[in-house]
Amino acid sequence: MASFPIDFDAFHTGALTMQDAADTLTVAQLQQATELSVTRMLAHIADCTDADVRFVALDPDAAEGVTNAEGDVLGWTLRHIIAHTTATAEASIFAAGELARGVVLQGIGRYETPWETLMTIEHCRQRLRESQRMRLASLAAWPSQPHLANRYSPFPGAEPLNAKGIVVLGLEHDATHQHQLAAIARQINTYGHCSIETSY
């Protein structure tokens, strides 16, 4: 698998701002990073079964997890993570396309496929492939000379980002959930393929 063209550690450590990091990237590199991001997610779930889409892994870093009777923090299911991360990445990349066209962005539109509808592992794979296709198509639709002076602050107090920066923001969010998918796959391999129902 090709090396990932973005070093997220550079702005996690403060060596670069997200926009500085984005400025070093070509549109072709953003396309490469988008394709690789989804390809890596597909690789994480390559050996998963239908039962595994409901597997609830231990996740002490989960911001929205719940605690079981033993005090362990439970994270989202595999299907919940896939629905969430693809929705956020798509929202970012389509907003970036508007910025690239010169539109003064008033907000970022976001739609999330209900995670409960991802009933099988093939549903999860289809959602990832669909997201990859949509995101690459959006990048391919950028004008030859994108309006990179056009910027948008994605939340109050955030650094204003141009089209490239907004794409990187979505990819950084992807990367966070890459770690969760990898952790779920490891736990499934440890505890066996099983179905653990969840009510959240």
Image (tube, grey):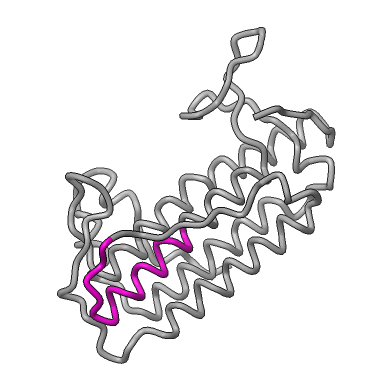
Tell me the quarter of the image containing the N terminus.
bottom right
* Residue at screen point 35% across, 57% down: 169
Q: Nearer the viewer, residue 127 or 40?
A: 127
Start-end of magenta stretch: 89-106
* Residue at screen point 43% across, 61% down: 91
* Residue at screen point 20% across, 76% down: 148
Q: Nearer the viewer, residue 35 or 93?
A: 93
Does residue 97 belong to the magenta stretch?
yes
Q: Nearer the viewer, residue 157 or 59?
A: 157
Q: Is residue 112 above or below residue 35?
A: above
Q: How many marks?
A: 0
Furthest-top residue in this view: 70
Q: Is residue 90 left or right of residue 83?
A: left
Residue 93: quadrant of the picture? bottom left
Residue 132: quadrant of the picture? bottom right
Q: Is residue 120 above or below residue 143?
A: above
Residue 110 lies, in percent from the top left, at 45, 57
Residue 33 lies, in percent from the top left, at 45, 68
Q: Is residue 14 left or right of residue 98?
A: left
Q: Main secondary structure of the magenta part?
A: helix
Residue 128 lies, in percent from the top left, at 63, 61
Tell me the quarter of the image containing the C terminus.
top right
Q: Nearer the viewer, residue 37 or 76?
A: 76
Furthest-front residue in this view: 106
Does residue 31 belong to the magenta stretch?
no
Furthest-bottom residue in this view: 144
Q: Is residue 68 above or below residue 186?
A: above
* Residue at screen point 52% across, 23% down: 60
